[in-house]
Amino acid sequence: MKPHFSATEPSTRLQRDREELAAIIDRSTGTDGHHATALPALTFFRAGTPGAQVCAMYQPGLALVAQGAKQVLLGGETYRYDQANYLVTSIDLPVSSQVIDASADRPYLCAMLCFDIRRIGELLADADLPEPPGTAGLGLSVSPVSDDLMDTVLRLVRLLDTPKDLPVLAPLIERELLYRLLTGEQGSRLRHVVTVGSRSHQISHAIDWLKNHYHQPLRIDELAGTVNMSSSSLHHHFRAITAMSPLQYQKQLRLQEARRLLLTERCDVASAAHRVGYESPSQFSREYSRLYGAPPLRDVEQLRAMVGDA
């Protein structure tokens, strides 16, 4: 089904590029959900109806919407991104997300590109960009889509039609895309994460530690020492960047992994709770219900039913 656009919308370069991007995503997907591409860092997402809130881990990357709209909830705030606004995530963040504008005739269509943080650091050095001013702020934000950004993403996506060009041209266009982001409205946020010694850089290391040790008891003093921060500084800057405390972040990691275990490995509730670090299955069930809106077994049954319907 071809994407639908209103005849009253202005025929600008940005709009033409957006229509082409929507058409490519539309013919490359066909069914709802995530779709991998020949570019490992590039993923397409399609939804034919508005959806319920879902919990997910957003990795550092760009989300550029070709059609429809989605919103992300983080720290009590709502961030909407749509045809006019792109989303950038500079650090791994557990969020609640929801497609809010989609229909069978006009599905939600989005291109997502994951960032290689090391390449951002290399580009920062090669381009001799200045150190970022001030503080990084929250690790997620929304900005207006520019002609140049849309054009760069579209040229990258077009390469999917010429696979022989991918190995040579894709790295060049990805580098250009990172450059445009680093020199744009979101540049300071991204530069902070890769600037050695910055608070964002230290918090990113704290997050890496939490991801690798989420099943272990969290001792803030030890974590703070690992990333060369005081306990109070770790708490303050971790919350400023992720909108949650280290303990809340760890809880999100544990519950997301437990959900995966229940769904894909068919663990019983007590085993899943123990494997992610909970000593009390009852506490695990309470916290799981608060996050996902249903007790573990009922939630997993509903998820399996949804997959079966699809």
Image (cartoon, rainbow, N blue to C red):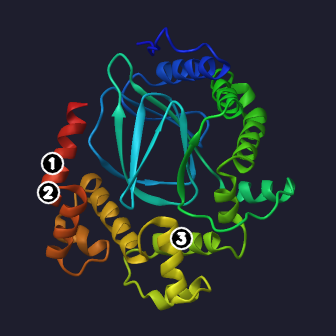
- Residue at screen point 51% across, 69% down: 240
Determine whether, in the image, residue 194 is placed left or right of residue 5. right
Residue 44 spot, x, y in % from top left: 50, 33
Residue 167 spot, x, y in % from top left: 74, 35
Name the residue carrying label 1: 301
- Residue at screen point 28% across, 58% down: 259
Which numbered tag is attached to residue 101?
none
- The amino acid type, in three-letter code, at marker 1 is Glu
Q: CA distance from mark 3 to mark 2?
A: 30 Å
Corner quadrant of residue 107: top left
Query: Does 140 appear above or below 144?
Result: below
Corner quadrant of residue 158: top right
Front-lying residue, 182 or 194: 182
Residue 32 spot, x, y in % from top left: 36, 30
Which of label 3 and label 2 is nearer to you? 3
Q: CA distance from mark 2 to mark 1?
A: 6 Å
The answer to whether the residue labelled 2 contacts the one labelled 1, judged by CB atoms less than 8 Å apart, is yes
Label 2: few (<14), some (14–19) or many (≥20) C-alpha neighbours in 10 Å: some
Determine whether, in the image, residue 173 is placed left or right of residue 45. right
- Helix, strand or loop at label 2? It is helix
- The amino acid type, in three-letter code, at marker 3 is Asp
- Residue at screen point 42% across, 33% down: 69
- Residue at screen point 22% across, 68% down: 287
The answer to whether the residue labelled 3 contacts the one labelled 1, judged by CB atoms less than 8 Å apart, is no
Name the residue carrying label 3: 208
Name the residue carrying label 2: 297
Which of label 3 and label 1 is nearer to you? 3
Residue 276 spot, x, y in % from top left: 32, 72
